[in-house]
């Protein structure tokens, strides 16, 4: 059970996380929200009973755990204003062995723990999480990373927050977060691009827009669920639906001729490199 939790930023991702906790009956005993938007504060007060603040003032920072859920480009300013609060120097948390030790959970894409520690102070216990957009409907997948051995409670709490919006896994090296960003973080956009292309092609073949949409969405959903439930790897599932000289073989031959695997590898490598580049840009500040 989380005794006290402050969300900094109450937008899409934070609302999904809080909604997930509420649904799983894991709401913290004391919930606080910091968000400059009065409408967002009203929603959090009505829906979740949060004590709301427009700025990260002293009383807002009193929680044992903090979830940082602002946009990556807003993170530096937010951290510097939290670090300026007295509570960071003299915490009320009785579990803290050092001044200012809070459990800090960041969901910001591409912001490394070294940057957070530089802005917010090195004494906190940091966990970096990379959820993806389907978290907004409770079907996300999140990778978590901590740069120091965490006690079980910190680990369980971070994971319980993320489990409310889908599945989760821990990675052992922070560099793996760049790969996670390239695979699952940006991944939904690749799937949407594939949907777009398949729907266009379906309409070119004479199907209506509504039929094309239904066929494509259900095919992607059904294939994903089949792959999840099957003990066979995707390559074998593909072989099972590809008879020699048939329609699927004809389509896959076009994919191969265009180096489909190479294209995907190049795209993901580019995304991972960009993730590392953006994180380095933050560290230079
Ligand atoms: N949405 C996703 O699917 C997704 C997926 C993976 C990771 N993430 C990560 O989640 C984080 C939040 O994304 P989001 O989509 O939820 O963004 P969002 O909907 O824009 O929410 C961010 C909220 O933070 C508020 N805010 C800005 N500065 C603040 C400050 N100094 N103190 C407190 N609150 C502040 C914003 O208010 P204003 O609008 O007034 O600026 C806004 O209400 C990002 O770092 C993103 O990388 C999101």
Image (cartoon, rainbow, N blue to C red):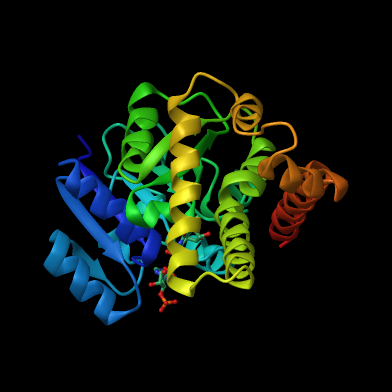
Q: Position of residue 198 (x, y in %)?
A: 61, 61
Is residue 122 in sight in this rendering? yes
| Residue farthest top in this picture | 231
Is residue 81 in sight in this rendering? no
> In the image, what residue occupies the spot 63% across and 51% down?
115
Q: Position of residue 261 (x, y in %)?
A: 78, 42
In this view, the residue in front, 122 or 113, is 113
59 w.r.t. 101: above or below: below
Q: Position of residue 22 (x, y in %)?
A: 18, 49
> In the image, what residue occupies the spot 31% across and 75% down?
54
| Residue farthest front in this picture | 245
State the quadrant of the C terminus.
Answer: bottom right
Q: Please state the quadrant of the image where ligand 1 appears.
A: bottom left
In this view, the residue in front, 153 or 270, is 270
Figure quadrant of residue 179: top right
Q: Position of residue 116 (x, y in %)?
A: 56, 51
State the quadrant of the N terminus.
Answer: top left
> In the image, what residue occupies the spot 37% across and 37% down?
158
Along the horizontal axis of the image, is 171 left or right of 49? right
Along the horizontal axis of the image, is 273 left or right of 208? right
Figure quadrant of residue 49: bottom left
């Amino acid at each position: 059970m989380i005794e006290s939790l402050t969300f900094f930023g109450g937008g899409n991702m934070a609302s999904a996380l809080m909604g997930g906790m509420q649904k799983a009956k894991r709401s913290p005993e004391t919930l606080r929200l910091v968000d400059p938007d009065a409408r967002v504060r009203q929603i959090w007060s009505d829906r979740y009973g949060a004590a709301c603040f427009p700025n990260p003032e002293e009383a807002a920072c009193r929680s044992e755990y903090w979830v940082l859920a602002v946009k990556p480009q807003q993170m530096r300013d937010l951290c510097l204003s939290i670090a300026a609060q007295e509570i960071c120097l003299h915490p009320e948390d009785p579990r803290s062995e050092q001044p200012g030790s809070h459990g800090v959970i960041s969901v910001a894409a591409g912001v490394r723990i070294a940057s957070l520690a530089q802005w917010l102070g090195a004494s906190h216990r940091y966990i970096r999480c990379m959820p993806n957009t389907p978290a907004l409907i409770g079907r996300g997948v999140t990778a978590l990373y901590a740069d120091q051995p965490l006690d079980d409670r910190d680990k369980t709490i971070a994971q319980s927050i993320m489990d409310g919006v889908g599945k989760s896994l821990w990675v052992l090296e922070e560099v793996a977060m760049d790969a996670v960003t390239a695979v699952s973080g940006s991944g939904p956009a690749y799937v949407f691009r594939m949907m777009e292309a398949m729907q266009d092609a379906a309409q070119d073949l004479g199907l209506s827009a509504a039929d094309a949409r239904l066929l494509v969405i259900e095919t992607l959903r059904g294939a994903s669920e089949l792959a999840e439930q099957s003990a066979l790897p995707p390559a074998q599932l593909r072989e099972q639906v590809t008879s020699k000289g048939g329609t699927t073989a004809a389509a896959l031959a076009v994919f191969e001729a265009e180096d489909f695997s190479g294209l995907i590898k190049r795209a993901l490598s580019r995304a991972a490199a960009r993730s590392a580049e953006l994180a380095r840009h933050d560290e230079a500040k």
